[in-house]
Image (tube, rainbow, N blue to C red):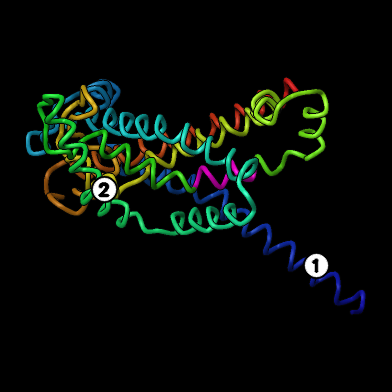
């Protein structure tokens, strides 16, 4: 290729890469500003506290209290995180440190299958399996809601749907540790488990925290699977057996309906904006954790 042709070709390649990068940078801002624009009619500073912390949701009467939906989202994601942490961490340790190679290949294939499974499949499985189990347990505990459609059922389903996402990150983390580090710990008299606990986990601590933080942000956005098992009752859940109504379920169930009600569209866009800000916050938090531990290293 001649020098005369090389310069315009290189310029073209550089230009389209910059355009692609600009789209990636602009897209989140465009989504955020469009949601803010649609929610703006409700963003009166005097009424913002009532919107965020109000418990009454009655669009026909102009009451748009979003706190039941926000609290339900937090409860579902929190229950999912509590379930995810021991399962994902122990699975990642076993697959990378203890499992024979053939078992590791089978488990990785299973994780990949789960990662590609549609959310609605997890939801149907939750309705068929998890909801009856939780319902029976709720009856034994004398819960007010014995149906099984609850925060607990939603937390279990969302944890299972997000686990492959977190597990893949943890597997990459554990495989990034050099074998020399492990061999050094073993040569100093440490057992296999002591090397994992005192060397691997300490070295990978920022990455592990960031993985679960990103997993929790993904839990907030799960829609169909959660919608099918959470109960969709507008209330502030006080117990894990109570039904809830997370923000994604609110949007999926109501957008496009009753748009003739004043400010209803703005209230739904505000809930979408809150959901976006929650996800952005957890992503920012994961990056801060990584930078904090890198600075200490």
* Residue 169 lies in the magenta-colored region: yes
Classify mark 2: helix, strand or loop: helix
Q: Find the distance from the CA under tag 1 to the CA under tag 2.
A: 53 Å
Could you tell me which residue is drawn at 60 percent across and 32 percent down? Answer: 287
Numbered tag placed on residue 85 in the rendering: none
Q: Which residues are magenta?
A: 165-172
Question: Residue at left 57%, top 41%?
Answer: 92
Q: Residue at x 59, y 52 (%)?
A: 104
Q: Which mark, residue 126?
A: 2
- Near mark 1 (Cα within 10 A), the count class, few <14, some 14-19 or many ≥20, is few
Image spot of residue 250 (x, y percent) = 23, 43
Q: Nearer the viewer, mark 1 or mark 2?
A: 2
Q: Is residue 49 above or below residue 254?
A: above
Residue placed most toward the observer, 9 or 182 = 182
Q: Quadrant of residue 5?
A: bottom right
With 249 as the anchor, is 234 left or right in this view? left
| Mark 2 surroundings within 10 Å by alpha-carbon count, few (fewer than 14), some (14 through 19), many (20 or more) | many
The residue carrying mark 1 is 10
Label 1 sits on a secondary structure element that is helix
């Amino acid at each position: 290729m001649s020098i005369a042709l090389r310069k315009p070709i290189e310029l073209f390649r550089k230009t389209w890469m910059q355009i692609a990068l600009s789209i990636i940078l602009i897209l989140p801002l465009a989504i955020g500003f469009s949601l803010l624009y649609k929610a703006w009619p409700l963003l009166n500073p005097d009424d913002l506290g009532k919107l965020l912390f109000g418990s009454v949701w009655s669009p026909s009467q102009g009451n748009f209290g979003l706190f039941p939906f926000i609290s339900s989202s937090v409860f579902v994601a929190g229950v999912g995180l509590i379930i995810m942490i021991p399962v994902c961490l122990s699975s990642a340790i076993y697959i990378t440190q203890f499992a024979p190679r053939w078992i590791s290949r089978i488990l990785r294939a299973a994780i990949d299958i789960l990662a590609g499974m549609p959310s609605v499949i997890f939801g149907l499985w939750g309705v068929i399996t998890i909801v009856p189990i939780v319902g029976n347990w709720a009856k034994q505990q004398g819960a007010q809601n014995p149906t099984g459609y609850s925060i607990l059922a939603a937390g279990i389903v969302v944890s299972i749907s997000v686990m492959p996402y977190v597990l893949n990150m943890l597997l990459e983390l554990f495989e990034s540790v050099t074998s020399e580090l492990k061999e050094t710990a073993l040569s100093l008299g440490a057992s296999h488990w002591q090397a994992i606990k005192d060397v691997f986990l300490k070295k990978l601590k920022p990455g592990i925290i960031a993985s679960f933080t990103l997993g929790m942000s993904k839990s907030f956005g799960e829609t169909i699977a959660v919608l099918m098992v959470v109960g969709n009752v507008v209330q502030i859940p006080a117990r894990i057996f109570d039904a809830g109504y997370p923000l994604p379920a609110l949007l999926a169930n109501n957008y496009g309906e009753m748009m003739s009600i004043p400010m209803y569209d703005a209230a739904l866009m505000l809930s979408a904006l809150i959901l976006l800000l929650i996800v952005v916050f957890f992503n920012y938090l994961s990056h801060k954790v990584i930078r904090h531990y890198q600075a200490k290293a």
